[in-house]
């Protein structure tokens, strides 16, 4: 989380293009409160990396990578849990390293995909 040019707290600079990823305003909202209480930030803390979808759900590196750029993934798909675009394309092309894949997750582990579901 950071502060974008307009003085708002956001997941990253992408918040200037994605209002869903803007969480409060400097001087108006206490950073500690935003960090502890904002629904998206809570969901990310509680859901990552277990709720990651697609190739990321099976990747052995997900606890280290955490889906790479969650903000970019959300911008592209509308899902906080979407897989990283690069890894998804690599899988589709048959280029994702098999040595990094674990077992396929059960359906119940990935039921919720949208923020607030």
Image (cartoon, rainbow, N blue to C red):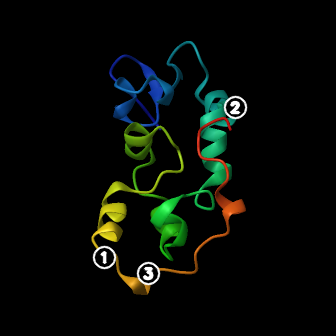
Q: Determine the residue positioned at 48% across, 30% down.
A: 21
Between marks 1 and 3 in the image, the one whose residue lies nearer the viewer: 1
What residue is pinned by disc 3? 100
- Point out the residue furthest to the top here: 28
- The residue that mark 2 highlights is 37
Q: What mark, if any, has residue 6 been given in the picture?
A: none
Tell me if residue 25 comes above or below residue 102 in the rendering. Answer: above
Q: In this figure, which residue is indicated by the disc labeled 1?
A: 94
Q: Are marks 2 and 1 in contact (CB under 8 Å)?
A: no
Spatial separation of the CA atoms under disc 2 and disc 1:
41 Å
Mark 1 packing: few (<14 Cα in 10 Å), some, or many (20+)?
few
Q: Are marks 1 and 3 in contact (CB under 8 Å)?
A: no
In the depicted structure, whether residue 25 falls above or below residue 35: above
Q: Position of residue 41 (x, y in %)?
A: 60, 39
- Image quadrant containing the C terminus: top right
Picture coordinates of residue 16 (x, y %)?
Answer: 35, 24
Going by the image, does 90 lie left or right of 74? left
Identity of the residue drawn at 66% across and 41% down: 42
Q: Secondary structure at mark 3?
A: helix
Question: What separation in Å lies between label 3 and label 2 (alpha carbons)?
Answer: 34 Å
- Horizontal and vertical percent for residue 47? 65, 53
Spatial distance from mark 1 to mark 3, Cα to Cα? 13 Å
| Helix, strand or loop at mark 1 | loop
Numbered label tally: 3
- Residue 110, image x, y percentages: 64, 57
Q: Is residue 23 left or right of residue 108?
A: left
Task: Examine the rendered structure and indicate whether residue 30 appears above or below residue 106.
Answer: above
Front position among marks 3 and 2 = 3
């Amino acid at each position: 989380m950071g502060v974008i040019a307009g003085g708002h707290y956001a997941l990253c600079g992408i918040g200037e293009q994605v209002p869903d990823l803007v969480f409060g305003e400097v001087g108006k909202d206490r950073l500690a409160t935003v960090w502890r209480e904002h629904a998206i930030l809570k969901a990310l803390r509680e859901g990552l990396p277990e709720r990651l979808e697609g190739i990321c759900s099976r990747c052995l590196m997900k606890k280290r990578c955490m889906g790479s750029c969650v903000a970019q993934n959300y911008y592209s798909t509308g899902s906080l849990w979407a897989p990283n675009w690069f890894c998804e394309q690599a899988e589709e092309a048959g280029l994702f390293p098999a040595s990094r894949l674990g077992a396929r997750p059960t359906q119940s582990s990935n039921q919720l995909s949208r923020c607030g579901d």
